[in-house]
Amino acid sequence: MNQPAHSERPAARPGSWAWGAAVFVAGWLVPGLGHALLRRWIRASVFLVSIVMLAAAGVWLRGKIYDTHAADPFEWLGYFADLGAGVLYPAALRLQILPDVSRAAGDYGTRFFAAAGTLNLLCALDAYVIGTGRKG
Amino acid sequence: MPNISHFDAMILFAAAASAVLAFLSRPTHHERLLNALKTFLTFVGGAIFIAWVLYFLSR
């Protein structure tokens, strides 16, 4: 019962730095894609659904999506966090109506999108570690 | 303007974050489920606890 969840399938490719970097970039661009390339289907699905859900909620709640016109270091941090969402970032910039952070919901939206970006970066890093063969 | 309560927003965030963190940090399905549940309850329980503390502090 407590067998590792990935033990039943072989690694997609032998671990190497290049393969790790490739799955990192894929995982960063599209949430879950890095793990899908590593044949970690369940993880890939969970990451895709959770991260897209958070990012979509962020846009729907009219959160602020930061761009390069940051006025202070915190806005730069927000920009880098948002950038972590990969292709969801330009999509959100396009879809974003006028952000409204004067209400709590808009502020939640800003945090939700930043959280989606940082979680996606964590997932991409996990894909990198698996891709290099340092984690099963 | 979309309307969402503070509680709904908290549940949404806690569910998504706890699922991702559990799948990143635990190797077996059983451990992941348990960890996701614990993290979710910590998020929600912690927020409710802090809300009550702030409620009494503000009186």
Image: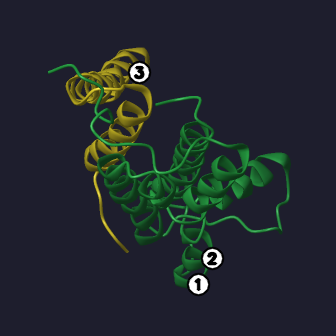
Query: Tag 2: Cα neighbours inside 10 Å, few (<14), some, or many (≥20)?
Result: some
In the rendered view, tell whether residue A48 sits above or below residue B42: below
- SS for tag 1? helix
Question: Looking at the image, which residue is at 59% across and 29% down?
Answer: A134
Question: Looking at the image, which residue is at 54% across and 69% down?
Answer: A100
Instruction: Work out whether disc 1 and disc 2 sit on a shared chain.
Output: yes
Q: Are marks 1 and 2 in contact (CB under 8 Å)?
A: yes
CA separation in Å, label 1 and label 2 = 6 Å
Rendered image coloring scheme: by chain
- The disc label shown at residue A94, or none: 1
In the rendered view, tell whether residue B50 sits above or below residue A8: above
Residue at mark 3: B54
Instruction: Work out whether disc 1 and disc 3 sit on a shared chain.
Output: no
- SS for tag 3? helix
* Colour used to depict chain B in the structure image: yellow
- SS for tag 2? helix
* Colour used to depict chain A in the structure image: green
Which residue is nearer to you in this view: A132 or A100? A132
- Pinpoint the chain carrying mark 2: A
Residue at mark 2: A90
- Pinpoint the chain carrying mark 3: B
Amino acid tagged 2: Pro
Amino acid tagged 3: Leu
